[in-house]
Amino acid sequence: MQFSKLVVAMVLGFGATVAVANDVKDGFYVGGSVGAFGMTGAAGDEEGSSTAYGLNAGYQKYIDTRTSLFFDLAYTKTNTSVNDKFLVPSVLVGYDFTLSNGKRLTPKVGVGMYKSYFDTNAGEKDGNTGVALKVGIDYEFTKNTYVGLMHTHIDAAETNGRITTLTLTKKF
């Protein structure tokens, strides 16, 4: 009797795994974001914050039924006095948790490079490059539409920046 319950549980468990495997798919995505940008100077002092908004696009590739890689390109613009703009190509890894309502919750973490562009006080154009660390979470709002939160830490020579945004993404 116990053995038959174990077999039934294994079959049902396998069925659930197959359902998840058939439901996930690789694909391209596009999205938008709005949030905040802040900088900290070399001495650790806060150098101000502003609104940040942007666009992102990329490709999500599943490694198995729950783990995926995101090849992402994000563009973020801020309304700082020097008109900061950031281009951040990155690779993230995410893991899908299926909630009781059937929706996915996907925490993700990654690393990339950034290129910043800004106006100098003399009215000239300038920029920096460096490492960007990313951590975020997405919730499947409707099929192939996700809302999320993304935090990007920008490591620069003299200042460190952080971009925290609310995201809306559509997968194709």
Image: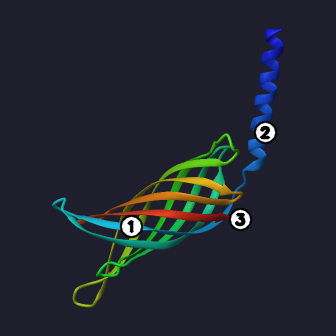
Label 1 neighbour load within 10 Å: few <14, some 14-19, many 20+: some
Please state which of residues 116 and 147 is positioned toward the viewer in this rendering: 147
As helix, strand or loop, the secondary structure at mark 2 comes to helix
Q: Is residue 157 visible?
A: no
| Left or right: 106 in relation to 113 | right
> Disc 1 residue type?
Ala
As helix, strand or loop, the secondary structure at mark 3 comes to loop
Q: Position of residue 116 (x, y in %)?
A: 37, 74
Q: Which residue is mark 2?
A: 18
Label 2 neighbour load within 10 Å: few <14, some 14-19, many 20+: few
Identity of the residue furthest to the bottom in this view? 123
**Label 1 or label 2, whichever comes before in sequence order:** 2
Exactly how many numbered labels are in the figure? 3
* Residue ID at (35%, 77%): 84
- Compared to 119, does 4 lie above or below? above
The N terminus sits in image quarter: top right
Q: Which residue is mark 3?
A: 172
- Residues marked 2 and 3 touching at CB (< 8 Å): no
- Name the quadrant containing residue 35: bottom left
Estimate the spatial distance between the alpha carbons at disc 3 and disc 1, rounded to whole Å: 28 Å
* Residue ID at (76%, 29%): 13
Q: Which residue is mark 1?
A: 36
Q: Position of residue 123 (x, y in %)?
A: 26, 91
- Residues marked 3 and 1 touching at CB (< 8 Å): no
Label 3 neighbour load within 10 Å: few <14, some 14-19, many 20+: few
